[in-house]
Amino acid sequence: MAAGAPRIFVSHLAGVAVFDPNGDQVGRVRDLVVMLRVGRKPPRLLGLVVELSTRRRIFLPMTRVTSVESGQVITTGVLNVRRFEQRPTERLVFGELLDRRVRLVETGEEVTVLDLGVQQRPARREWEADRVFVRKGRRSAFRRSRGESITVEWSQVSGFSLEEHGQGAESLLATFEQLRPADLANVLHHLSAKRRAEVAAALDDDRLADVLEELPEDDQIEILGKLKEERAADVLEAMDPDDAADLLAELPEQDKERLLSLMQPADAAEMRRLMSYEEHTAGGLMTTEPIVLRPDATVADALARVRNPDLSPALAAQVYVCRPPDETPTGKYLGTVHFQRLLRDPPYTLVSSLVVDDDLQPLAPEATLPVIAGFFATYDMVAAPVVDETGSLLGAVTVDDVLDHMLPEDWRETEFHLDEEEEPLRTEARKGAGDRGARA
């Protein structure tokens, strides 16, 4: 939804139809799932509970919603049809928050929640429930109060949010939301195995996938092994393909095949292709999802792809121009256009006219780690194309993957400075370490 998107009140979404991009109805909205935050911060809208025609209720993440209007919801068409299961940090809007008694902060008056207003924050691509429609007065067994109804900001009511200094796991998990994946991974690494499993179970799939990519191999295997198999497959699908393939390769053959069988066929095929390469080669390190454009694409097309906030900075630094097909393995690789060059040319310019390194030999999938590192150092690259003997682009190796494999195995043990606001997490990590020591 674009900047200045209108606020939508959740009561208008109850029972509305959910459509795929082709206009076919896939179900109806039965509830909304939010995660409360510490203090009076508005809760984040995680997704929708959608009831399919079969009566099965599934979870539709907001990342797979392209449009929300009062009369309909449009999805990307990618649905996980596994049955919805509510997690410890999640709250159902219709089932748990509406009709709740809360208090106005300014007056202390008790009011009844009638509705919540949700809006997307374009800068962060997050949805928040930032408004509360409440009625003053209270209902009795004999009559309904006709008190005044008003709309207030989320911060103007109390009785919803988690306590700032609460000791329960819920408050801890809400605090975790503030951390970058790498920092959260560092905290999880130092928790007890029991606490680590509790946190992993409560994180949503995309968040857990980001965190797993930053954890040591042993922690990855431990966490994945404690998830239900269906959810483990979902988390693997949400990870970057190269990281997911590395993790799968470390599992026993039986477990690996079982998880692959639960994944979408296209994702499973991609995993198998990546696992066919040696670990410390360009093929084993590459991601299969770089930005690929056809020769007739324009600078405007390229910049639109680069703006995708889900891309890492290294992947967003350049685009790869190839003949069809657009997905890896592509047609003939023609060359690379760097982000800075895209900024210097008019939007209507064809990217094929901007290729700057068509004379630079790309990496072969068999290229070893020292060769890759030398390539990056020689040509000042943050990402490099991997091309096979037929000239097809297979993927791209990014500098973070190279560093990850060149650093010592225990590099994640390095203690980084934590800000004061992260001190509770430091304390929790120490407590987890103490728990481990007590059981040893």
Image (spheres, rainbow, N blue to C red):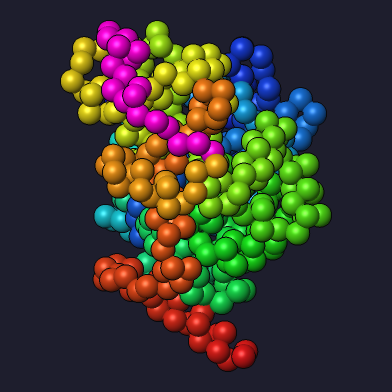
The residue that appears at 55% across and 85% down in the rendered structure is 435
Closer to us: 403 or 375: 375
Left or right of 437 on screen, residue 107: left
Which image quarter is the N terminus in?
Answer: top left
Closer to us: 90 or 329: 329
Q: Answer whether residue 357 is magenta in the image.
A: yes
Which image quarter is the C terminus in?
Answer: bottom right
Instruction: Indicate the quadrant where residue 303 lies.
Output: top left
Residue 330 pos. (x, y %): 54, 22
Note whether residue 225 is visible.
yes
The residue that appears at 36% across and 16% down in the rendered structure is 301
Instruction: Indicate the quadrant where residue 299 lies.
Output: top left
The residue that appears at 50% across and 36% down in the rendered structure is 364
Determine the main secondary structure of the stretch shown in magenta.
loop
Residue 350 sits above or below residue 1 on the image: above
Q: Answer whether residue 259 is magenta in the image.
A: no
Closer to us: 264 or 155: 264
The residue that appears at 53% across and 47% down in the rendered structure is 281
Q: Which residues are magenta?
A: 348-365
Residue 94 pos. (x, y %): 58, 41
Note whether residue 153 is visible.
no
Residue 126 pos. (x, y %): 40, 39
